[in-house]
Image (tube, coloured by chain):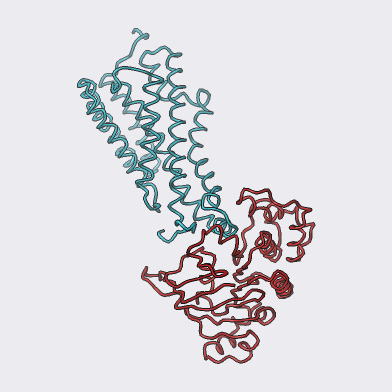
Amino acid sequence: MDNQGLVNLGILDLVVAYSLVLLAIGLGKLKRIGQEGQMLWASLRMVFQLLAVGYLLHFIFAVQHPLPVLAILLVMGGFSLQVIGSRIKRKMPRFYQVVGTALLIGCGGVTFVFCSLVVHYSPWYDPRYLIPLAGMIIGNSMNGASLAAERLGAEMRERHEEIETALCLGASARQAATPSLRNAFRAAIMPTTNTMAAMGIVSLPGMMTGQILSGTEPMVAVRYQIAIMCAITGAVAITAYLIVMQGYRSYFTKAQQLDMGWE
Amino acid sequence: MVTVDGVTFLGRNADGGSVKLLDGISFSAKAGEITAIIGPSGGGKSTLIRLINRLTEPSGGRISVAGVDIGTMDPLQLRRLVALVPQKPFMFEGTVLDNLQMPFRYRHEAGPAAQSAEVAEVLTLARLDRELLERDARSLSLGQQQRVGVARALITKPQVLLLDEPTSALDRRTSDELAATLREICHGRNLTMIMVTHDLRLTEKVADYCFYLEAGRILEQGRAAELLAHPVTAELKRFLSEPSGQEG
C-alpha cells in the first residue's frame, strides 16, 4: 500500500472500527456497569450525525455558493447559543442578547480576520475553509461563553456581601464587581490556556492529526494548528470579555444598586 | 440631618406576590444625636436604612439629607456622604490598613498612610490598637472586625453614619465598649447617626431618640429614655418584655 497519500476507509474498515465500540459495550455488560444502552445510543447518534453532516458538506462543496455556507454558519451559531442557554440554569436578564452579541462579535470578528488576513483563500466563502475554521472557533467560544456566563452569575451570588460593602464605601458597580469579573474571565479562558500549554506534549491536536492523516506535510499541519489555536484563543477571550463586561450590568440598577431580585 | 417623609417600600413575599414592607414612614434624625430604630426581626428596620444610602430604592415617599432629595443625588456622591456599616462588615482581602484605604481606592485617590492623622483619628475613635494595622483583617475577632467596619466608614468623614445591628455578633463587654465608642464619635464629629438594633441595652446606653418599628410601620417614637421607660402601645410593651428584645 502507498502510505504517502490518503488511505480511504471502506465500509468494512468502519465495521471493524465500530467493533471496538461493541467491545466497550460488551465489557460494560460483562462487568454490569450499566452504561451499555447509553454507549450504544451515543455511538449510533455519532455515526448518523456525522454521515448526515458529511452528505450536507458534500452538497455545499459542490454548490460553491455563499448562501448555504452562511446558512450553515448561522445554524452553528444559533445551536451554540441554545446549548449555552441550556447549560445555564439561572440566566441573567437579557441573557440571549448579551451572549448572542458576544458570540457574533467574538467569533464573527476573529473568523473574518483569520480567513481574510491569515489563510487568505479565495473566494471568501469557500466552504472547504470557512466551515471547519468557523466551526472550531465557534465550538471553543461556546465553551468559553458558557463558563463566563455561569461563573459570572455564581460569583455575583457568592460575593453579594462583598459587593454591597464596596457600594457602601462609594464604589461604582464596575469597581464593586471587578473581583467577580476577573474570576469569570479567568474561568472562561483557562481551558484554552491549558490546552495550549499541553499541546504537542500531552496531546496531538485533532485538526493537525487529521491533516497529517490526509497526507499533508507535518510542518504545514503544525503551522495551521498554531494559527487556529491563536484564533481560538482570541475568539474565546473576546467572547468571554464581552459577556462579563456586558453581563455584570444586568446585576445592577442605574442607581448602582445590586439587584438580584430577578433570580 | 436626615428627613424621611412618607416612605413606602414594596417587597415580595414567599409566593412572589407584592407586600408592603414599609408603610408611610416619616421621621427626622438630627446631627449630633443617635437615633435608634428598634423592633422585632422582619419589621423593615434594615430595609429602611438601606433606603437612606440608596442601596435600595423606595417605592414611594421622599428621603433628604441636609435638605437635598437623595433621589436627585448621584448615588456614589450620596454614599460618600452617608456611610452604612452592615450587620457583618465584610473584610476585604489584605491588612486592616488596606481595608481602611479601600474607600480612597474607589475614588482613585492615594489612601492615607499608616502614620497619617486620618488613620490615627479613626483608630482612636474606633478604639483599635495601632498594632492591628498590619494584621490580616480576616483573622481578627468579630468584635475587632465590627470596629474596623466603623473605622473604615468614618475615615472618609461622612456626615451621616448608618449602623445595622452593630452589636449582633458581640459579647456584652465588647458591646458596651462599642456603645461608648459610638457616643464619642457621634458627639465628637457632630454626626447624624441612625442605628438599627434589637439590642435594648445598647439603645438605653447610646440612643438620644428612638422609634419602634413593627410590620413596616412606626408605632411609637420619642426620647429614648422616655420611650423605653414608659411604652404606650401594647406592641412595644410586648417587645420590651420579650427575651429577644433584651439581647446584647
**Residue B54 percent coordinates (x, y):** 51, 64
**Residue B134 percent coordinates (x, y):** 75, 52
**Residue B92 percent coordinates (x, y):** 63, 54
Q: In this view, does B55 lie above or below A42?
A: below
Q: A122 left or right of B235?
A: left
Q: B74 left or right of B124?
A: left
Who's the residue at 32% across and 14% down the image? A7
Locate the C terminus of chain B by quadrant: bottom right
Who's the residue at 56% across and 58% down the image? B77
Who's the residue at 37% across and 23% down the image? A115
Q: B168 left or right of A222?
A: right
Which of the 4 quarters of the picture holds residue A162? bottom right
A169, B43: nearer the viewer = A169
**Residue B20 percent coordinates (x, y):** 41, 75
B119, B191: nearer the viewer = B191
B84, A222: nearer the viewer = B84
Locate the N terminus of chain B by quadrant: bottom right
Which of the 4 quarters of the picture holds residue B172? bottom right
Tell me the red chain. Answer: B
Tell me the cyan chain. Answer: A
